[in-house]
Image (spheres, rainbow, N blue to C red):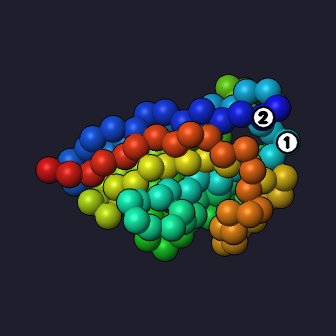
Amino acid sequence: QLQFVESGGGLVQPGGSLRISCAASGFTLDRIAVGWFRQAPGQEREGVACISRGSTFMHYVSSVKGRFTISRDNAKNTVYLQMNSLKPEDTAVYFCAASPYYRGSSYNINEYNNWGQGTQVTVSS
């Protein structure tokens, strides 16, 4: 059974950087695409970025494009999200999830499975 564990969240000042991780167990990560999502209090869960199995394709939503970078290390069974130039509006719980196919700009949560428990990212001075 594939399970994800997110880590690396924390409190960071506006303009700062943070790298969060999504470690997979129970499954070989190179067989699946992975998406990062986030959910702020009182808001719906929204897509942030996604990456194909072999890292050939990546997509970012417009609000994070140019600031966030998604990557994966299949040997370590881990996907990363490097977040730079963080803004208060990036504050949310960040989740990773699996998809058998690369979805590109479609972040339909019903097409993703095996959600992790999330890691809190707070951007505040």
* Quadrant housing the N terminus: top right
Residue 31 circle label: 1
Mark 1, other Cα within 10 Å: few <14 / some 14–19 / many ≥20: some
Determine the residue positioned at 36% across, 52% down: 84
Q: Is residue 97 visible?
A: yes
Residue 50: quadrant of the picture: bottom right
**Is 1 or 48 nearer to us in this picture?**
1
Determine the residue positioned at 56% across, 56% down: 37
Asked if marks 1 and 2 touch (Cβ < 8 Å), the reply is: no
Q: Which residue is mark 2?
A: 2
In the figure, 78 relative to 64: above or below? above
Determine the residue positioned at 30% across, 48% down: 122
Residue 40 circle label: none
**Is 60 or 90 nearer to us in this picture?**
90
Whether residue 96 sits left or right of residue 65 in the image: it is: right
For the view shown, which residue lies furthest in the front direction? 42
**Residue 54 x, y percent position in the rendering:** 78, 46
Q: Judging from the image, what secondary structure is the residue with disc 2 in?
A: loop
Could you tell me the amino acid type at mark 2? Answer: Leu
Q: Is residue 19 visible?
A: no
Q: Judging from the image, what secondary structure is the residue with disc 1 in?
A: helix
For the view shown, which residue lies furthest in the left direction? 125
**Residue 47 x, y percent position in the rendering:** 57, 64
Whether residue 41 sits left or right of residue 116 in the image: it is: left
**Residue 27 x, y percent position in the rendering:** 82, 31
Could you tell me the amino acid type at mark 1? Answer: Arg
1 or 2: tag closer to the N-terminus: 2
- Measure the alpha-carbon separation of dots 1 and 2: 11 Å
In the figure, 32 relative to 78: above or below? below
Determine the residue positioned at 49% across, 73% down: 62
